[in-house]
Amino acid sequence: MGVISIPKEHPDCENFLPRALQLGETYDLVICDGQVLRTHARAKYREADEATRLAVTQLALGLENLTPGGTMVVLLHKVEPWNTIRLLSKFKQCASVNLFKPTRAHAKRSSFYMVATQVESRCPQAVEAIAE
């Protein structure tokens, strides 16, 4: 994501892994449903922003490596917050967007899936979203 080297003074410097996705490698389907669980151990300084960091990283890497015209499936929580509405709006600018809420597994949870098909991952709005 634009970082060439990790500063030695970074508290997690030793924990970074080498790049897993090769530059220019694309996929027809990207699934973004990683989430931070309460049981995950993490440094105190990462507590407040870990869920947002994970979601944004998945979206940026997924969109960056999605073949134009491909499909993204994204796990989201609560449709009402401004960030979710903004994300759905951005995807609608370059894809066909449908929301799906499994009635069995997610009936009592706020989670749902955004299924974006025909994603024009190289359109100006998508490139801007990746950079943002």
Image (cartoon, helix red, strand yellow):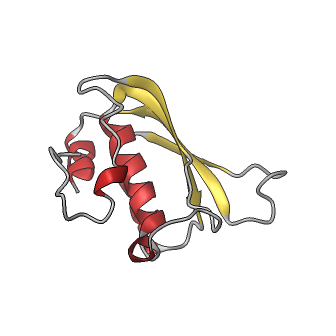
Left or right relative to 59: residue 80: right
Locate the N terminus and report the quarter of the image it occupies. Answer: top left
Q: Give the x, y percent position of residue 13.
A: 28, 56
Q: Quadrant of residue 11?
A: bottom left
Residue 84, placed above or below residue 47: above
Name the residue: 38% across, 76% down.
Answer: 45
Left or right relative to 116: residue 90: left
The total of numbered circles placed on residues is: 0
Query: Of 54 and 71, which appears nearest the observer?
Result: 54
Left or right relative to 4: residue 115: right
Q: Quadrant of residue 98?
A: top right
Q: Give the x, y percent position of residue 123.
A: 24, 37
Residue 114, placed above or below residue 45: above
Query: Of 21 and 95, which appears nearest the observer?
Result: 21
Q: Is residue 49 visible?
A: yes
Name the residue: 59% across, 62% down.
Answer: 40
Name the residue: 55% across, 64% down.
Answer: 41
Q: Is residue 92 visible?
A: no
Query: Of 7 and 104, which appears nearest the observer?
Result: 7
Left or right relative to 98: residue 109: right
Q: Give the x, y percent position of residue 104.
A: 84, 51
Locate the C terminus and report the quarter of the image it occupies. Answer: bottom left
